[in-house]
Image: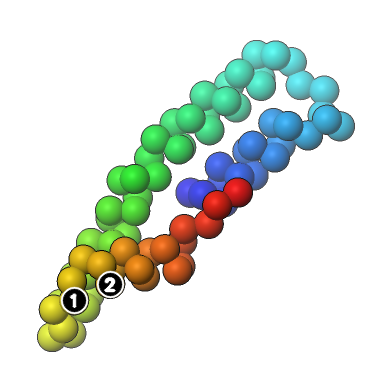
Amino acid sequence: MQELIYSLKRERMNPSNEWQIGYQKALTNVISEAESMLEKEKEVIMDAFHEGMRCQGWDPNRGIAEEYYNETFNTKD
């Protein structure tokens, strides 16, 4: 999801493209909608990691799942 948001932002700001204002506004709306879904995506990924560890007989705390998420998915643009 984060890579998609980054790509959309890059395309929206690309000065070589001559998009109409309506198309740029639509891209802005799509970016905002995708950004609003990031926290839900993070929770789902962390829950899956935690459940996978639990099924293997481990009982990791929530911090380990968040550390996994941050190392694997949390990229800042």
Assess whether mark 2 and mark 1 are in contact (beta carbons under 8 angstroms): yes
Looking at the image, which residue is at 36% across and 70% down?
68
> Farthest residue in the front direction?
63
Q: Is residue 48 visible?
A: no
- Pointer 1 local density, CA inside 10 Å: few below 14, some 14–19, many at least 20: few
- Judging depth in this view, the residue of 60 and 48 nearest the camera is 60
Name the residue beneath numbered marker 1. 60
Instruction: Report the side of 72 relative to 51 (left or right).
Output: right
Check disc 1 and give the amino acid type.
Answer: Pro
Taking 51 as reference, is 11 above or below it? above
Q: Position of residue 29 (x, y in %)?
A: 52, 24
Looking at the image, which residue is at 23% across and 61% down?
47
Label 1: state its secondary structure: loop
Name the residue beneath numbered marker 2. 64
Instruction: Report the side of 43 relative to 6 (left or right).
Output: left
Looking at the image, which residue is at 39% across and 35% down?
36
Q: Position of residue 37 (x, y in %)?
A: 38, 40
